[in-house]
Image (tube, helix red, strand yellow):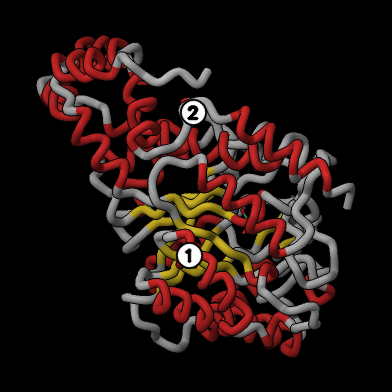
Amino acid sequence: MNLPPTNYPAAREQYARNGIDTESALRSLESVPLSVHCWQGDDVVGFEGSGCSGGGIQVTGTYPGRARTLDELRADMEQVFRLLPGRHRLNLHAIYGDFGGKKVERNAVRSEHFESWVEWAKGLGLHGIDFNPSFFAHPLANAGATLTHRDPGVRQFWIEHGTACRKIGEELGRRLGSATLTNVWIPDGSKDGPVDRKGARLLLEESLDAIFAEPLDPLHHRDAVESKLFGIGSESFVAGSHEFYLGYAVKRQKALCLDAGHFHPTESLADKISSVLQFVPEILLHVSRGVRWDSDHVVLFDDPTRAVMEEVVRGDYLGRARIGLDFFDASINRVAAWVIGARATLKSLLHALLEPAGALRELERDGDFSGRLAFLEEIKTLPFGAVWDEYCVRQGVPVGWIAEVRAYEKSVLSRRGDG
Ligand code: RNT
Ligand code: ZN
């Protein structure tokens, strides 16, 4: 598995004969950071001491080795970053603060709780940190409502959480010299159809406006909002639907988060990109893989993921599309899950960067759709693997990496016991 690649020069030539410059594709790939989610390592539990996830997030699997502490999670992520070619970002949720064993209410989270993450990210030379308020796994979220709760006191609590998280995001962005994207996702909805959908959505807009009231310097901080189709327990109604957030993001010029699992299974996420970027300043992609539903399976180098990256590249959107990972699998080695999904995302992006865009566009412009289809099929079997392997070698990461994760499992993960 771990053989050094020797066939890159031939691959480069073959691509060149098809009008594709592999060197320029590799340069572009190197400049794109992934926002690597911290929550694959501990099943979205966090460090508040409650020990439970939930509230619209479902993790399945009981594979041993879950990270139970900050140090364990960081050690696991360091192992992940060692196996990813390129320079990447950390994506944190508010529940992952360094609370020092103390109970810190969600509306009292402050940037000091994330100071040790800043130091850690700097030490690793990460590209930056992204952030998320956590509107789930909390007693005040149990009714299935947070920002849309009918009780103004509960609503206010969550508004304060959102506001506090934006300030944290801004500070993270300032400290790392790279704008933090803070993404708002709420689970609010209901199992059966409500009578007053309108009321919930009016409240959601009002709450979001309150959270976003203070303008923050875009150099340090940007806001994103994430829609969802349904969740477990919110099958009939989700306040923050796609239409709601698309409208909101256009109105307030926020970044729109598109999660691959948050649409009807036959909808194409890829097709949405050029539409929404016509009207919102930025998008955040939550790269994920839904199997039959929003199951957050590990991302693969598959057709839907490649199609998303193709759209990002074809539309020249790399400057306006942030690529975040959002999957969590507890049925396999969690570090392996992270690495598989992150590398599959990078491979999909590289594959898109290796497309002979000019020639394809020309065929399309000439109305030669037979030629376009034929060419698209032909380029699928170009020696892509040799280019990917070359990228890994140049970036100093192993081509075949599972042995390293197995060794880590043996020496670290398997000693953790259950829990
Ligand atoms: C949930 C959303 C959300 C979360 C993370 C933990 O359906 O996809 O993005 O997965 O924020
Ligand atoms: Zn998501």
Could you tell me if residue 310 is visible in this image?
A: no
In this rendering, does residue 222 appear at all?
yes
Tell me the quadrant of ligand 1. Answer: bottom right
Q: For numbered disc 2, what is the local secondary structure?
A: loop
- Looking at the image, residue 74 lies above or below residue 49: above
Q: Residue at x 51, y 40 (%)?
A: 83
Give the residue number, with chain letter if any, for mark 2. 301
Q: Which residue is mark 1?
A: 123
On screen, residue 47 above or below 365: below
Residue 309, label in figure = none
Task: Rate crowding at label 2 as few (under 14), some (14 to 19) or many (20 or more) other CA atoms within 10 Å.
Answer: some
CB of mark 1 near ligand 1 (< 8 Å): no
- Does residue 119 appear left or right of residue 13 in this picture? right
Locate residue 47, reporting x and y percent. Answer: 75, 68
Say which label, 2 or 1, has the lower sequence index: 1
The residue at the point 42 percent across, 66 percent down is 249
Quarter of the rendering containing residue 5: top left
Of tags 2 and 1, which is closer to the observer? 1
| Residue type for callout 2 | Phe
Q: Quadrant of residue 411?
A: top right
Q: Secondary structure at mark 1?
A: helix
Q: Residue 17: x, y in percent?
A: 14, 14
